[in-house]
Amino acid sequence: MLQKPRGTRDFLPDEMEGRRAVEMKLREVARCYGYREVCTPEFEDLELFTMRSGEGIIEEMYVFEDKGGRKLALRPEITAAVIRMYINEAKVAPKPLRWCYFADCFRYERPQKGRYRQFWQFGVELIGADTAAADAETIMLASDMLNATGVTYELKVGHLSFMKNLVKDLEPAMQRRVRAHLDKKDYEGLNATLESLNRTDLAASLTALVNTRDLVEAFEIAGAIPEKERFEQTIKSLDAAGVKYSLNFGIARGLDYYTGMVFEGFAENLGAENQILGGGTYRLAHLFGGDDVASCGFAIGFDRVMVSLGDIKSAIVPVVGLVCTSEGRTRALVVAKALRDAGIRTEMDLMGRGLGAQLAHAAKTANFAIVIGQREAESGQVTIKNLLTAEQKTVDLAAAIAEVRAFGPG
RNA sequence: GCCGGGGUGGGGUAGUUGGUCAUCCUAGAGGAUUGUGGAUCCUCCGACCCGGGUUCGAAUCUCGGCCCCGGCCCCA
């Protein structure tokens, strides 16, 4: 038997309803902040993704050549595509642009808990606003979105300039190595690297910076950083808005294109792959031949949020099983249309079952049965049965529709 | 790419000193029951992940592969 490709998943209706419910919550928060949805191609020129990340990432992407010999890749993330799209289509649109997306991405990696080869990201990009207010609003949006899902998480906010300022005298390659050590809390590796550079004087301040959760202390450790005032304003705004977060100056994010403020969200019950959100301010457009527009954005790892939330009970919605005899079938079709026109999920027998068997099936799949036999066909009324309470009555169609519509949780 | 644990009908399982038609529950289809239910009874459907090896004989032992789960690496 054929299996699905490694790292992919099938979603049955129950699970899809849960996913859609969470997706709609995210969409609604983004909408309220003014973010409008965009959509980019599922695959792009390979170059779009290698331009900033190097050839190394080819190993972790689905790369292929089309019949015209073009080198393409399934998108491993969406920010780069959105910025490409901005340059191609929307450079002159009034700033700032607030865009969001919900789409699947592909990475050729070893699957494990919360990591799949096809996965979904809900992301937002704020393009063209280079202010503390923009940074703060983006974090607020992230916080509100995660809150809306109900997931339990921790939000960490940091800024790259603190660490960059401490290591600014080192060569770029060494700066990256130091940041990698700190991101992983690998202090032994850090010390070894600093010793090889004869810069053990940095060790104390670097570890102090990574461990502090206090803004004033961080400024004392890192010294004069150019974005001091902006970051202070950002933090002040977050506090004013009541955002729950902690400061963390060890966040390095894997990417070089982040320029300042960075933030990450972590869920508690996910094991090794517990990051559910990542974002920050970045400049990417100039890489793709555009202006050097400042952007700020983040992406939520939708699948990890779903894993963290666990099983979701989908909302109870009214379902009608339309039960009919052969004499009532013509009338039943008319009744079914009326129910469906009223927005009610209505299912008729397709198996040629008798009345009892139809009712038995309805009892498993619906919360109302509407019975149409010869009597109902002649009288024009319908018999409606509440399958939970077993109450049954014969009423006009309009009354039956009203009763079904009134059904809800509780 | 590395380490560990796994893979028996759609779901959940029994079966490993190798040995008749592979167990049970559940789900699904049909019937007893052509104007009223999920009970009961009966029938049907349906599996040893794939391939090689050892053997008279493999779900069981062995090798390789695939896939799943957890961890490492990586994480744009």
Image (cartoon, rainbow, N blue to C red):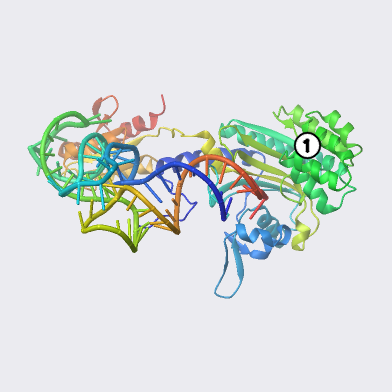
Q: Where is residue A140 in the image (x, y as percent from the top left)?
A: 70, 35
* Image position of A218 (left or right of A390): right
* Image position of A115 (left or right of A18): right
Q: Looking at the image, which residue sits at the far right? A: A224
Q: Position of residue B46 (x, y in %)?
A: 24, 50
- For residue B28, above or below residue A5: above
- Quadrant in which the C terminus of chain A is drawn: top left
Q: Position of residue A378 (x, y in %)?
A: 17, 39
Residue drawn 21% across and 48% down?
A: A351
Residue drawn 62% across and 60% down?
A: A59
Subunit bearing disc 1: A
- For residue A297, above or below residue A204: below
Residue drawn 62% across and 41% down?
A: A31
Decide if residue A214 is in sight here.
Answer: yes
Which amino acid type is shown beneath numbered disc 1?
Phe
- Quadrant in which the N terminus of chain A is drawn: bottom left
* Image position of A189 (left or right of A113): right
Q: Where is residue A294 in the image (x, y as percent from the top left)?
A: 79, 50
Q: Quadrant of residue A297?
A: top right
Dot 1 corresponds to which residue? A249
